[in-house]
Amino acid sequence: MAVRLGGGQGFYGDGLAPVSDLLEAGVDYLVCEALAELTLAILQKDRQRDESLGYTRDLPLYLAAALPHVLAGRTRLITNAGGINPIAAGRAALSAARSAGATGLKVATVVGDDLRPRASDLALPPDALFANAYLGAGPIVEALRAGADVVVTGRVADASLFLAPLVHEHGWEWDDWDRLAAGVTVGHLLECSGQVTGGNYSGAWWENPDPLRIAFPIAEVDEDGTAVITKPEKAGGMVSFDTVREQLLYEVHDPARYLNPDVVADFTSLTLTDLGEDRVRLSAARGGPAPETYKGLVCTPAGWAGELRVAYCWPDAEAKARAAVRYVRSRAEATGLPVEEWCEEYFGVNAYGGPTVDLAAADASGWEPPEVIARLAWRTADPESAGRLGREVGVLGLSGPPGISGTGRGRDGRPTQLLAVEPFTVERALVDAQVRVSVAEA
Amino acid sequence: MARIQLRDLCGVRCGDKGDISDISLFADDLAAYEAVLSEVTPERVKAHFGALVAGPVERYEAGNVLALKFVLHQALGGGAPRSLRSDNLGKTHGASLLRLWIEVPEEVASGARRRHAPVSR
């Protein structure tokens, strides 16, 4: 009997709507991968503010989506949403389940990836903010054997989250390298959600069916390790040889030696066969013994960043933008600001000019960008220095090159309250009657 | 021989690990794969990226899926959480690789199937 895995999440902040399609199509396991390297750094900042945080806070949303299916015994949920605080994440999952009225749900928490308790044995830097090992599938298999409906882990190698239910269901041995390699390959293909089903596809992405509703992927994995990558029928996107091979090699470095804590997989040995109708078969995967060591990741402070973003309109937009950047950099030098590194960037295509800009003629020779946004970033050892240069920037508003403009008010989709202002007239006497002058002496 | 830009010949996907930018280049048939295999050398990629990549460039072959893998070291300004770059994850590096022009046999150029997206303004 093939085991059906759903790739329910590819990063912290991924879409939730495609998860319902997976659950509706039916998956034995919904597997959610939430932890990029950058994510751990974000979670570390959360935990610095509040010891009870440090996990991906959308965990309750995934749990709520999966809960009816989990309680009905159709699906189990595996997630590494625990981040650098899996115990808190486990508690959050239990409390979300309770507040949804669930009883008897078994939530397993996997800990042990945190290396800080062994900092001195490992000679970790004394200022390490977090240090974790990438665990393999073993502890998740143990949790599943104990009857867990939901498994919450911290840092587990992405693909091992998917390997675990395959080992559990098919009874694969821990030295059955080819089967383990097949499982890790499946996991690697599913761990980035829509990236295997038409998302970030470098081919004719504009011809994706229903491109605003890219499906998340499903794998049907047989006992012998043969698998079919597919997607819920009713959702958009596509699964083809091309979309699958793009994900196959994503971030793997040496494709003949994909290192995973459970197996070293050889992605150059396997065969991908496009079966049509959004089905690609994966077969003949080969693997070898797991690495002697676990991979670890340690995070240490690396200074502070400050940033200026200032836009200039045509004409001479680039020259103006570069002049503004020179101005700010010269202020840093003049004030002796200890900047350790600079980064200058220039963006722009017609944000301001609307139809006054003839983009059709833009390819003609002598083209000048309608605007340029200068971005200047700097690194300093301390936050005060990083912030000090920010205060040197305001003068550009009235005393810099002409044509300065804005780059928008919102960041990361955060809301901004909008305000309306309206001029009107008022009787002088009404105002004059309330005007007072007071003089105080220090 | 014909001159062709990689964007017209290949697909690409890229990602990051630490300060490493990891780019896969996909050919659409064996002839195109052999052409990029001989033309898109690690040395050439290193030179193409210039100051964006401070470290060495390694290349791996995945002939089973007609792909080359390039591993660019010290390529992200220190790695995503440390980098000052706006593209701190190197998400544009694949596209940057596609800017490369190479020499290929005439039939490879004429068989190129990669298309450009239409723009609706």
Image (cartoon, helix red, strand yellow):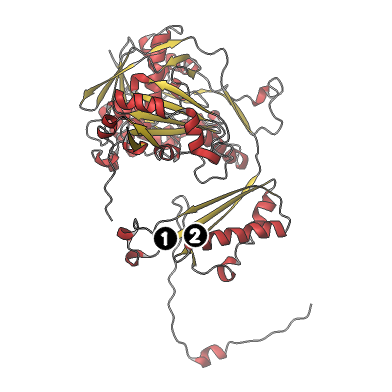
Q: Is residue B30 above or below residue A209?
A: above
Quarter location, residue B115 = top left
Tell which residue pokes out farthest to the front in this image.
B1
Task: Mark 2 or mark 1: name the one nearer the start of the chain.
Answer: 2
Q: Residue at horizontal 78%, vertical 80%?
A: A441
A215 or A139: which is nearer to us?
A215
- Confirm or deny contact between disc 2 and disc 1 (CB under 8 A): yes
Tell which residue pokes out farthest to the left in this image.
A277
Q: Label 1: few (<14), some or many (≥20) within 10 Å? A: some
Question: Which SS class for mark 2?
Answer: helix
Q: Is residue A267 above or below residue A61?
A: above
Q: Chain of mark 1?
A: A
B85 or A82: which is nearer to us?
B85
Q: Residue at horizontal 55%, vertical 41%?
A: B51
The answer to whether residue A50 is left or right of residue A407 is: right
The answer to whether residue A89 is left or right of residue A281 is: right
The residue at which mark 2 appears reads as A318
Where residue B44 appears, as percent x and y from the top left, is 47, 32
The residue at which mark 1 appears reads as A368
Q: Residue at horizontal 39%, vertical 17%?
A: A268
Q: Is residue A320 above or below residue A289?
A: below
Quarter location, residue B77 = top right
Calculate the distance from the C-alpha at mark 2 to the C-alpha at mark 1: 9 Å
Quarter location, residue A353 = bottom left
Dot 2 amino acid type: Glu
